[in-house]
Image (cartoon, rainbow, N blue to C red):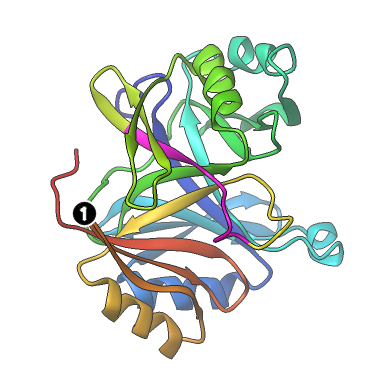
């Protein structure tokens, strides 16, 4: 494999859906992804989604018990860590929760699923053969990860202590603040307080953003493919975004940046 990504960097995303074939059909048509099914168990496969042979994201079939429990599909953000056991070992003392203790993912790597003190779930990933995505910030690839939470200050304290993140805050047009997550000088995602634009009772959560060449066209295409527009294409000072759902309920954001990203 290639060299692991820097400690604390968002490096991968995937989604479990009830119907794997339908999921592949939607996302390959929407983003122009290719799909490569790889064995992940006796009767299962993990679909590597990519652009021109470079991996972007993953997709798999939800376990039967998840489907029976009515757990909705959700894109999951993965954060590279260089010592998974050490990092996961601090989650509880910092007020978070271990959802799935550290385990091996075949020869690809080792992961743990955690929730921060507000309940937002995220994965920790120690790379072996699979470092993560091979392309970012171009149309059709992951470009941003964003936390919506009711307590930004508490979230910053948790993630700073757990992962060494630093933060910069800047005002938004609505008068609230947007917090940019950084590793050194590199932007690594964002945080924002949940306001009246979220339905009452919406839990804290991480969202995955995919870069697109045209937010309006992507929203129209998603609808044509049976998906849903949750937030119509909306102009912001650095581009235009739209929040979409696939036909099975997996929510994601498509964004066209008008400023350079690294």
Label 1 residue SS: loop
Q: Which residue is mark 1?
A: 138
Residue 49 location (% of width, % of height)? 40, 59
Quarter of the view holding residue 211: bottom left
Q: Which residue occupies the foreground of this view, 37 or 133?
A: 133
Residue at position x 59%, y 37% from top? Answer: 122
Quarter of the view holding residue 243: bottom left
Residue 234 location (% of width, % of height)? 33, 69
Instruction: Kindly tell me whether residue 173 is visible in this rendering.
Output: yes
The C terminus: image quadrant: top left
Query: In this picture, which residue range is highlighted in magenta?
Result: 188-198
Number of disc labels: 1
Q: Is residue 82 magenta?
A: no
Residue at position x 29%, y 43% from top? Answer: 134
Whether residue 185 sits left or right of residue 218 in the image: it is left
Residue 159 location (% of width, % of height)? 53, 22
The N terminus: image quadrant: top left
Residue at position x 32%, y 51% from top? Answer: 173
Neighbor class of circle 1 (other Cα within 10 Å; few <14, some 14-19, many 20+) is: some
In the displayed image of the protein, which residue is found farthest to the front?
Answer: 175
Q: Is residue 197 magenta?
A: yes
In the displayed image of the protein, which residue is found farthest to the bottom?
Answer: 224
Whether residue 55 sits left or right of residue 67 in the image: it is left
Instruction: Kindly tell me whether residue 131 is visible in this rendering.
Output: no
Whether residue 32 sits left or right of residue 60 in the image: it is left
């Amino acid at each position: 494999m290639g060299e692991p990504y820097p400690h604390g960097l968002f490096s991968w995303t995937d989604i479990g859906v009830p119907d794997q074939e339908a999921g592949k059909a939607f996302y390959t048509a929407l983003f122009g992804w290719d799909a490569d099914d790889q064995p992940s168990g006796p009767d299962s496969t993990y679909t590597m989604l990519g652009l021109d042979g470079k991996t972007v994201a993953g997709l798999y079939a939800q376990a039967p018990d998840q489907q029976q429990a009515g757990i909705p599909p959700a894109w999951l953000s993965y954060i590279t860590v260089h010592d998974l056991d050490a990092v996961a070992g601090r989650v509880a003392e910092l007020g978070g929760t271990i959802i799935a203790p550290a385990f091996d993912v075949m020869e690809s790597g080792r992961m743990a699923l955690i929730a921060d003190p507000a309940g937002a779930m995220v994965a920790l990933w120690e790379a072996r053969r699979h470092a993560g995505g091979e392309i970012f910030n171009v149309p059709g690839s992951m470009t941003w990860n964003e936390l919506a939470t009711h307590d930004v200050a508490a979230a910053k304290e948790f993630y700073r202590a757990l992962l060494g993140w630093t933060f910069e805050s800047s005002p938004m047009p609505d008068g609230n603040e947007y917090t940019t997550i950084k590793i050194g000088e590199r932007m690594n995602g964002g945080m924002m307080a949940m306001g009246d634009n979220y339905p009452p009772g919406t839990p804290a959560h991480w969202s995955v953003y995919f870069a697109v060449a045209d937010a309006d066209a992507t929203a129209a295409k998603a609808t044509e493919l049976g998906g849903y527009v949750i937030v119509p294409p909306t102009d912001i000072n650095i581009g235009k975004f739209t929040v979409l759902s696939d036909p099975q309920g997996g929510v994601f954001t498509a964004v066209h940046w008008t400023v350079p990203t690294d």
